[in-house]
Image (cartoon, rainbow, N blue to C red):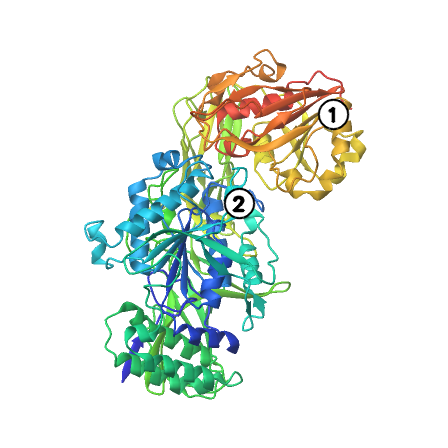
Amino acid sequence: MKRLFLFFLTSFTASLFAQHNQIISPQPSSQIVDEIKGLNSFVKVLYVAAHPDDENTRLITYFARYKHFETGYLSMTRGDGGQNLIGPEIRDGLGLIRTQELIAARKTDGGRQFFSSANDFGYSKNPTETFSKWDKDKVLSDAIYVIRKFQPDIIITRFPETPGITHGHHTGSAIIAREAFDLASDPNTYPEQLKFVDTWQPKKIYWNTSPWFYRGRNEEFDTTNLVKVDVGHYLPSMGESIEEIAGRSRSMHKSQGFGSSGARGESFEWLVPVETKKGTTNGDLYSGIKTSWKDFGAPQIENEIEQIIKDFDALNPGNSVEELISLKDNIKKLNSSNQKVKDKLSQIDNIIIECLGLYVGVHTDKAYFSPGDTVNIDFEAVNRSEKEIKIVNIDLPGSSNERTGLLSPNKPFTFKSSFVISENEAYTDPYWLNGNQTDANFDVESYNLIGKPENEPRYNASLTLSINKEQINLMVPITYHTTDRVKGKVIQPLHIIPEINIEPDQKVMVLPVNKSRTVTVTLSSESPIPSGTVKINLPDGITANQKEINYNTNGVERIKSFDFTISAKKPTDFMQDNVSFEFITGTRSFKDYTLFVEYDHIPNQIDVKASKMTISAVDITVPDVKVGYIMGAGDEIPELLSEVGMDVKLIGVEDLNGGKNIPYDVIILGVRALNTLPELSRSMDKIYTFVENGGTAIVQYNTSYGLSVPSPGPYPISISRDRVTNEDSPVTILHKDHPALNKPNKITNEDFNNWVQERGLYFPSSWDNNYTPMLSMNDQDEGPLEGSLLIANYGKGHYIYTGLSFFRELPAGVPGAYRLFINLIGFDTAADKP
């Protein structure tokens, strides 16, 4: 009896880099035919760039959906250092979102997703700066491992190696790709990898150029000697053009606002030959590459596949099963040692399952569990073909019962089961966040993890099925299924989280010297919280009214908050995560909480974090003013200002009331408000009226792309892409006597210590003389930039435009950023108010 172990994947080949379906469910017949056509294809293409959304989805769709090549995208980072257009998450939380957006994009365009261990530390102006932070040797090792594992014939970079044209991460990704191209075949390069993979030599590497790279360079986009690829084809099996599919793929990058409707008709991409190996030529994309069964000495296999395609019955795809099993037998008889030939066997098994119309779902009654919990399982399998499928065995976690039976046509096979999660089971937070990460690199050493886009499913059901005496083993993730009254069927991954979460309500706190503040920590659990003790651990210089609070359970409460009153007599040194919390019950201790990231367009994500917060005792005066905050793309500033003692209310554009009789002293526009709120463009005159009557308006950074107004101020301002990426770059205070730098807090150069990721971004490059620039700063070897903070008198009030990255600095608890931002809010408290 024949036996094959098959892990059911979204792509054809079972491999280390699986991107998992939540259930097994067939595709339409037209797409099954595309998969059969893929059996005649051997070319593999790897696209390489730096971030989520850098990839050219048109080319990926062309190769994966039109040419039926196995196509991957290696993103050096997960985009953690970018901005977020749909919510407040930044850094790790944003990386979780963008990782899942990339996986969703690949499921759309047919590609596969890979990552290196590089962390997106923010904008970088050149590869020298990039490699001064990234561990280049580790990132290069990751790229070589992915190449050796995936075995691409062609590598395509999104960016050139020439510095200065684009982001330093972009240039760095091209340099890494070319060096990996040269070294992946050398057994002396990272020889420790050869326990897991073989050396591999891609045949060609190209740069995917476009007119964009020549803008502003006084150089024409010359296509002479370039490889021309027509990406305008229509795909009848999909009912869309390549560009329409690519548009849907690109639209998955919702956190970056990259929605695209695609296009139809002839369209071209251009490839610049970078390097080719002996036996290949530049102009012919596929020269020197084994592209068909003929190249492997088996033209009869190609003929057999063509016959299967010819015989395929779209209304009864199960009729192709016998031919597919015969095809697999004939491929086995080749006794080929070539991995690409061997991969065809698992591709065929995937297609057999598709042809059978098989549905398998293994689901639980909730999404989140903890160690020691019982998981109740509902199993459902339906054979929607006329073929006979025998169940040889179904293996579930914690169950030794042997289950056999017959999957009769269109009759559900169902049963219930359960298992208990081990008390020592690890949480399911992302593997790359579990090590000793830095701002520039994740700590990923295991070759079982390098390159993977996400965690493997923690629990699976293993099915052994027999079809015409051919055994196939399917691994189906155990997931949470529910029916939402609005969304319909919802499937989410199963997550394991702490039994008791202990979470500080505030993640950062600026503590005014000689003032007391309340720190709140909350216990939460799905079961009643047991009796125990909540502890706070404080750094030197900060004291609490009590360091322990005892809790006696009432057997009912599942959420309980505890308050500690803290104070300090003098400023303390800034240190992140310098306060920790612990809940002790009996012999058990809980020191973590769960960050939930939940959006409709991606599966729910978690990050289990240590129960810590950052507290700095700061010499700071908080003015007594009322602030109205209009949220833009999303940030945490209103909450953080409230916690430091300011009176801040979230308001909408509709609350501007013509600019008169507004019950606030200051109006603040959140980050990218003029990019994300179209209605705001029609109401800026109300803000100008508010300022003219004596109010203060603060407008935080916007991008010039998608700006909803000609100028983001009452006097002309021209926004550029200027930025200062080094968070430690020197800052010169241009007007030391200006009230904004003296009231209510004296701002000095010390206030620019301990900033994170950057100074600021999208600074204005020119402005009307009515604006006064407050600061000058620049990155190394660049000229000074004075557009980071502009203040203008307008009528009786003040209009402030700033590109300083307060949206990053305040959540990081940077004391000087708080002092400066509070000054911008309150320096004019004596002015007449509207």
**Residue at (59%, 24%) from the top-left corner?**
789
Task: Name the quadrant containing residue 233.
Answer: bottom right
456 over 172 or under it: above or below: below
Label number found at residue 691: 1
**Residue at (35%, 34%) from the top-left corner?**
132
Q: Where residue 96 sits in the image (x, y, percent)?
A: 46, 49
Would you call the spot at circle 2 few (<14 residues within 10 Å), some (14-19), or many (20 or more)?
few
In the rendered image, is residue 105 in sight? no
Label number found at residue 584: none
Quarter of the picture containing the C terminus is top right
Which residue is situated farthest in the top direction here?
A: 737
Task: Name the quadrant containing residue 701.
Answer: top right
Q: Where residue 320 sits in the image (x, y, percent)?
A: 43, 85
- In the picture, measured across the screen, residue 157 lies left or right of residue 366, that is left
Q: Find numbered disc 2 in the image and state the secondary structure of the residue it sits on.
A: helix
Q: Find numbered disc 1 in the image and state the secondary structure of the residue it sits on.
A: helix
Q: Nearer the viewer, mark 2 or mark 1?
A: 2
In the rendered image, is residue 717 in sight? yes
- In the depicted view, which residue is nearer to us: 39 or 753? 39
193 over 320 or under it: above or below: above
- In the depicted view, which residue is nearer to us: 322 or 359? 322
Q: Which residue matches tag 2? A: 212
- In the depicted view, which residue is nearer to us: 70 or 285? 285
Circle nearer the N terminus (2, 1): 2
How many marks overall? 2
Identity, as a three-letter code, of the amino acid under mark 1: Val
Contact (Cβ within 8 Å) of mark 2 with mark 1 = no
